[in-house]
Image (tube, rainbow, N blue to C red):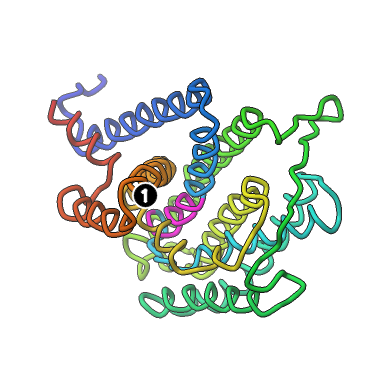
Amino acid sequence: MAPSLAMKPPSRWLRLFGRRVVRAVGIGLIIAAALLPLTGNTFYVRLGIEAMLFGVLALSVDILLGVAGMLSLGQAAFFGLGAYISALVLTQVGPSIWLAAGITIATVGVFSTLIGAIAIRSSGVYFTLITFGVGEVLGKVATNLSWLGGSDGLLGVPVPSVGVFGLVDLPLTNNIVFFYFVFALVLALYFGVRRLLDTPFGAVLRGLHDNESRVPYLGYDPFRYKLAAFVLAAVVAGIGGMLYPVLRGFVGPNLFAFEISARAVVMALVGGIGTLIGGLAGGGLITFLESVIATVTERYLTLLGAIFVVFVLFCPDGLIGFIRRKLHRL
């Protein structure tokens, strides 16, 4: 005889409820984002593209911090590296977004594997400091190399068209086309990462987050799984950076700055750590808040810092967690 619903552990139903809430909120956010171009305002359409790109960067932070329990303050290194590689391919090789994507993913993957193999041997604050240092070093390198444009960066990055199976070319010079191309890419990244983390690979990463010392007794090598998570997060960040020069028309050393990495962490925390969709939600929220507050005062970073403190004190599980708790109480 099948057990009744009341006999099953409450925690199981809370987890099931939480997943359904996250799924419902995610669907709502996707619909809202898809409708943004209908406003007809070019400024908000391009701001929406920027929000999605930084949301991808926040998603990479959530993979490390929310799933594997590793705080990286150097995700801007991979975001900036992806942006520079893409800009170099588009300006020096040819205006092909697929070629830029392939070279970006391969280069970021190899580079992050080398860095991760060193950084992951440390833990806690030492891991965080190593990742922070990588971003600072790359920023100095980009500033001092003349063939990368020095402190001015690379200017005049062309806006390519996107070929679809050789049948049609989608011009990214059209803001609506560009928006929906980025929108489709972000959806593919989100669902791809989510599907991957729903496998035993994701279960091991969550085990590392909860109690790393017990994972080896289950027959898993923590180093290999942490390195895989590090490379996955780096590639996701690099894909986000790949499209940034296409949006702005240039790329500069400021993309490696600590401010970009810290902003990505704030986005992930505000959206909700460990939910994946929270990084995208936080990216959109912080980007639009920056734009609105900057029109009112030059001290917008102070106000954003205050908003972050409020979230940490009164809503530590982020926007998604807040919605989940309110619906659960109802």
Q: Position of 288 compared to 249: left or right? A: left
Q: Nearer the viewer, residue 205 or 215?
A: 205
Please, is residue 57 above or below residue 323 in the view? below
Position of residue 126 measured from the top left corner of the image (x, y, whole percent): 40, 80
Q: Quadrant of the N terminus?
A: top left
Q: Secondary structure at mark 1?
A: helix
Q: Position of 121 compared to 91: left or right? A: left
Give the residue displayed 39% in from the left and 66% down from the top. 71
Crowding at dot 1, Cα within 10 Å, few <14 / some 14-19 / many 20+, comes out as: some
Give the residue displayed 58% in from the left and 50% down from the top. 240
Q: Position of 237 compared to 68: left or right? A: right
Give the residue displayed 66% in from the left and 69% down from the top. 111
Please, is residue 217 above or below residue 162 in the view? below
Region of the chain picked out in magenta, as a range: 57-66
Residue type, label 1: Ala
Q: Which residue is mark 1?
A: 294
Position of residue 201 measured from the top left corner of the image (x, y, whole percent): 51, 52
Q: Nearer the viewer, residue 207 or 75?
A: 75
Q: Nearer the viewer, residue 256 or 185?
A: 256
Position of residue 330 measured from the top left corner of the image (x, y, whole percent): 13, 25
**Can residue 275 be seen at all in this image of the molecule?**
no
**Can residue 326 be seen at all in this image of the molecule?**
yes
Give the total of numbered labels.
1
